[in-house]
C-alpha cells in the first residue's frame, strides 16, 4: 500500500494518475485482465460515479460501465439531465471504478485488493474535485466509508473523501431486482436537488 500511496501522490494530473496506476504492478488482478479501465466522461463534471470493477464488456473495451449495467446507468442519469458525453459541467458525468482491472469470474474484490487501490481512488477524486460523489454498490462503500450493506446505506447522504456522497444500489442489482428501481429513482432526484442547492 505504501508504494501505491507514493505513486498516487506523485500524480499531478489525471493523465499522470492513469499512467502511474496502469504501470502499478502490485495488484494481482492486473495479470488476469485484458485491459486497464481508468475512467470515462467529463473530468469537469460536478458528479463523479465510483463503481466497483470492470466486468467482461468493460475489460474488452477498456472503458467503465459499457455493458448492460452501464447502459442502465446511462439511462438513469440521463433522466436527471446528466450524461458522460455532456460538455457543460452542470450536465456532465465522470465515471470510474474502485478497481481498474477485472477480477476473475467477476468475483468481488477482496479487502486487501481494495486497500491497495484506495490511494489511487482518493487521488482520482481529488484531481476531478466533484461536488458530489455517487458510491455505486458495496465495493465503493467499503473503499470510501469502510462500510458494507448497500441496502441500508443507500438513500442517505454521507461524506467520502471530504465531499457529499450518496450510496446507491448498483445498476446490475437493479437489473436483477426491478422493484428496487423506485428507490434508486428517489436517490437520483435527491442528487439532482443537492446539485441545485450546491450551485
Ligand atoms: N460494474 C461496475 O461496477 N463497473 C463497471 O465498470 C461495470 C460494471
Image: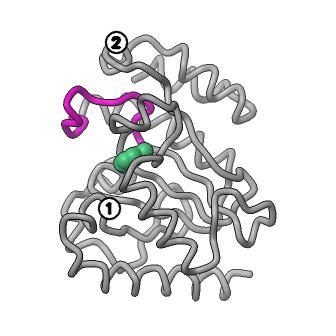
**How is the rendered protein coloured?**
one colour
Q: Residue at 37%, 68% (x, y): give it.
A: 167
Vertical relation: 182 (above or below) 57: below
Which of the two residues, 99 or 63, is positioned nearer the viewer here? Answer: 63
Q: Which residue is mark 1?
A: 170
Mark pair 1, 2: CA separation? 26 Å
Q: Main secondary structure of the magenta part?
A: loop
Residue 186 position, x and y percent, is 40, 87
- Secondary structure category for the residue under label 2: helix
Where residue 21 sits, quadrant-wise, is top right
- Secondary structure category for the residue under label 1: loop
Which quadrant would the C terminus be assigned to in this image?
bottom right
Q: Is residue 76 left or right of residue 154?
A: right
Where residue 16 sits, quadrant-wise, is top right
Q: Is residue 113 left or right of residue 160?
A: left
Residue 32's disc number: none
Tell whether label 2 touches label 1 (CB within 8 Å).
no
Where residue 92 sits, quadrant-wise, is bottom right
Q: Residue at 23%, 36% (x, y): give it.
A: 106
Residue 175 position, x and y percent, is 26, 65
Vertical relation: 107 (above or below) 194: above
Which of the two residues, 105 or 138, is positioned nearer the viewer here? Answer: 105
107 inside magenta stretch: yes
Residue 188 position, x and y percent, is 47, 80
Which quadrant would the N terminus be assigned to in this image?
top left
Residue numbers of the magenta segment: 98-110
- What is the crowding at mark 2: few (fewer than 14 residues within 10 Å), some, or many (at least 20)? few
105 inside magenta stretch: yes
Q: Which residue is mark 2?
A: 31
Residue 185 position, x and y percent, is 40, 83
The residue lying furthest to the right in this view is 88
Amino acid at each position: 500500500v505504501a508504494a501505491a500511496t507514493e505513486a498516487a501522490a506523485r500524480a499531478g494530473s489525471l493523465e499522470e494518475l492513469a499512467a502511474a496506476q496502469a504501470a502499478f504492478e502490485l495488484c494481482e488482478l492486473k495479470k488476469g485482465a485484458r485491459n486497464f479501465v481508468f475512467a470515462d466522461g467529463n473530468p469537469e463534471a460536478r458528479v463523479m460515479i465510483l463503481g466497483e470493477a470492470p466486468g467482461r464488456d468493460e475489460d474488452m473495451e477498456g472503458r467503465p460501465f459499457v455493458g448492460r449495467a452501464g447502459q442502465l446507468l446511462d439511462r438513469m442519469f440521463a433522466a436527471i439531465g446528466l450524461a458522460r458525453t455532456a460538455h457543460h459541467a452542470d450536465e456532465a458525468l465522470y465515471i470510474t471504478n474502485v478497481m481498474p482491472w477485472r477480477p476473475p469470474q467477476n468475483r468481488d474484490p477482496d479487502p486487501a485488493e481494495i486497500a491497495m487501490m484506495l490511494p489511487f481512488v482518493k487521488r482520482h477524486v481529488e484531481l476531478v474535485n466533484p461536488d458530489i460523489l455517487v458510491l455505486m454498490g458495496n465495493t465503493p462503500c467499503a473503499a470510501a466509508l469502510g462500510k458494507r450493506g448497500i441496502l441500508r446505506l443507500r438513500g442517505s447522504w454521507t461524506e467520502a473523501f471530504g465531499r457529499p456522497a450518496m450510496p446507491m444500489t448498483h445498476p446490475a442489482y437493479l437489473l436483477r431486482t426491478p422493484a428496487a428501481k423506485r428507490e434508486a429513482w428517489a436517490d437520483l432526484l435527491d442528487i439532482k436537488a443537492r446539485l441545485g442547492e450546491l450551485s
